[in-house]
Amino acid sequence: DAMVIQNPRYQVTQFGKPVTLSCSQTLNHNVMYWYQQKSSQAPKLLFHYYDKDFNNEADTPDNFQSRRPNTSFCFLDIRSPGLGDAAMYLCATSRENAGDTQYFGPGTRLTVL
Amino acid sequence: AQKITQTQPGMFVQEKEAVTLDCTYDTSDPSYGLFWYKQPSSGEMIFLIYQGSYDQQNATEGRYSLNFQKARKSANLVISASQLGDSAMYFCAMREAMNSGYSTLTFGKGTMLLVSP
């Protein structure tokens, strides 16, 4: 089945230690998104790629970076995680058509010690 | 101003009963889409149903239907015959600027639904 896969499902890191979360998709979608979701809150868009074009939300901290080496993979790098970065990180994909649905992966739950 | 408002932080329903989760939205764009997602405790966001602003009929997907009232700017989710597995957080989301290429989703704050036996 076509799907969005995120690894790892659970990630524990230390304060200030860089961490990379990965997302892959077999849907061949043009657009990939990264969301941050803190406990009991709505998902918050961090950035998205339209093919190789990177689009950063205005309020996304510089501490968060992303890479998309090819259509299938997208990475979220947190350069120096703080305690406030502990959250669920959700990857989603969609086709380029504006009306198309975003399909989400299972998420990576990040803990910062 | 919030673009998506979900006024019910939590809802309780008994198994096999129907439940309506409220969602109102605010946009001046004539072309938009409304989505409902389910998020169980495991964290995955599961797409449930979609309604386009120009759709003439209310969307339905199995036990899910969307009560779309355009003039009132509401898009309530109706779950018929609730099941224990329906217990989850439910998010309403909107996509604007549908005619100008891809656009991003704005989510509401969610409603936690608990289904009891």
Image: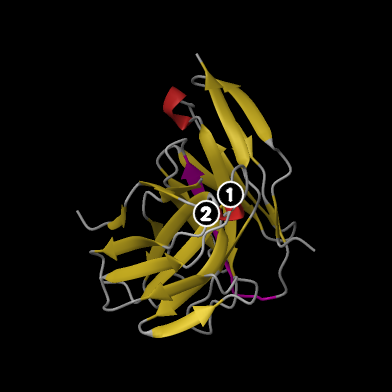
Residue at the top extreme? B117
Q: How many marks?
A: 2
Mark 2: secondary structure: loop
Examine the image and state in which quarter residue A17 appears.
bottom left
Q: Mark 1 points at which residue?
A: A38
Q: Please tell me whether residue A31 is drawn above or below residue B81 in the rendered image.
A: below
- At a point 57% along the width and 48% down the height, the residue shown is B91
- At a point 52% along the width and 54% down the height, the residue shown is A15
- The image position of residue A27, as x and y in percent, is 26, 65
Q: Which of marks 2 and 1 is nearer the N terminus?
A: 2
Foreground pick, A47 / B7: A47
In front: label 2 or label 1: 2
Identify the amino acid type marked 2.
Phe
The chain ID associated with circle 2 is A
- The quadrant the N terminus of chain B occupies is bottom right
- The image position of residue A92, as x and y in percent, is 41, 62
Compared across the picture, whether B69 is left or right of A13 comes to right
Q: Mark 2 points at which residue?
A: A15
The chain ID associated with circle 1 is A
CA separation in Å, label 2 and label 1:
17 Å
Examine the image and state in which quarter residue B14 appears.
top right
Label 2: few (<14), some (14–19) or many (≥20) C-alpha neighbours in 10 Å: some
Mark 1: secondary structure: loop
- The image position of residue A39, as x and y in percent, is 59, 43
Q: Please tell me whether residue A99 is drawn above or below residue A86 in the rendered image.
A: below
- The image position of residue B20, as x and y in percent, is 62, 36
* Highlighted range, magenta: B29-39
| Predominant SS along the magenta part | strand
Task: Tell me if I can see residue A11 in this picture.
Answer: yes
- At a point 44% along the width and 37% down the height, the residue shown is B63
Foreground pick, A35 / A10: A10
